[in-house]
Amino acid sequence: MESIIITGAGTGLGKELALLYAQRGYEIILVGRRKEPLQSVQKQIESFGGKAVAFSLDITNNEQVHKAAETLCQKHNITMLINNAGVGHFGPLEQMTEQHIHEMIDINVKGTIYMTKAFLPYFKTLQEANIMNIISTAGLRGKVNESVYVASKFAVRGFSESLVKELAETNVAVTAVYMGGMNTPFWDDCNHIQDRSRLRSPKQVAETVVNEYKRQPEIIVE
C-alpha cells in the first residue's frame, strides 16, 4: 500500500486531504505537534476501513525531522509528502511580536524545507514520488495586515518554483497549491476575517485539489 505523509493533518485542510486520500486507498501518515487531533482523524479514517498512523512531530526541529524520515521510510511505502502545516499572525507590522515572526518563518518556511529535504533522498530512489506544498494565495500577492505571513508564503512559493526546476529531470514532481481563505480553526484566535461564512470549507478545497492534481507545478483554487 502506498502512503502519503501530511503535516498539519489534525484539522482543516490537512484533515480533509487525509480523509479524501484515505478513501482513495492510500495509507495516511498524520503528522502534527499534538497527538490528540491526529488520533481523532486516524479513528475517522479507520471507521470507514482506511488505514492511518498518527505521528507526533515538531517540523521546526531539523534533527527530529530527519530521524522521523528515516524511521517512517523504513516502515512505510511513502510516495507523497504534503507540506500543509502552517500558522498565521495578522495585524500591522509594528504590532507583530518577535515570537509571532519566528513562528511563521519557522513553521511555514523552515518546516516545509526541513520536511522536503529529509524525504527527498528517499523519494529519488522511487519510480515516482510527489511533493505538494500548500501555500495559499498569500503566496501570490501582498495583503493588508499580513506582511510577515505573506513573506513566509512568498518564500515557500520561491522554494517550490525552484524545486520544480531543480527536480525537472527526476522522478519527483513538485506542486504548489494556492487557495483562498477557508473556514477552519486557523482563524479561531484572531479577528482578521470578520465574516467566515463567505469562506470555502476545507472539504471543498480538498476535493478540488485532489481531483485536479496531475503532478503539475501549481494548482490555484480561488
Image (spheres, helix red, strand yellow):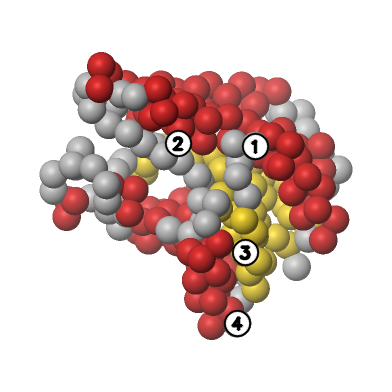
Label 4, residues with CA under 10 Å away: few <14, some 14-19, many ≥20: few
Distance of mark 2 from mark 4, alpha carbons?
30 Å
Residue 49's disc number: 4
Q: Looking at this view, is 212 or 140 the one in front? A: 140
Mark 3 or mark 4, which is nearer the start of the sequence? 4
Using the rendered image of the protein, determine whether residue 108 is visible from the camera's viewpoint.
Answer: yes
The 10 Å Cα crowd at callout 1, few under 14, some 14 to 19, many 20 or more, is some
Label 3 CA crowd tier, 10 Å (few <14, some 14–19, many 20+): many
User: Which residue was labeled with disc 3?
Assistant: 54
Mark 2 — residue?
Answer: 135
Label disc, if present, on residue 61 of the rendered structure: 1
Residue at 60% across, 82% down: 49
Indicate which label's residue lies in the foreground, 3 or 1.
Answer: 1
**Image marks 4 and 1: residues in contact by CB distance under 8 Å:** no
Q: Secondary structure at mark 3?
A: strand
Mark closer to the observer (4, 1):
1
Residue 45 lies, in percent from the top left, at 55, 74
Q: Is residue 97 above or below residue 115?
A: above
Relative to residue 56, is residue 79 drawn left or right? Answer: right
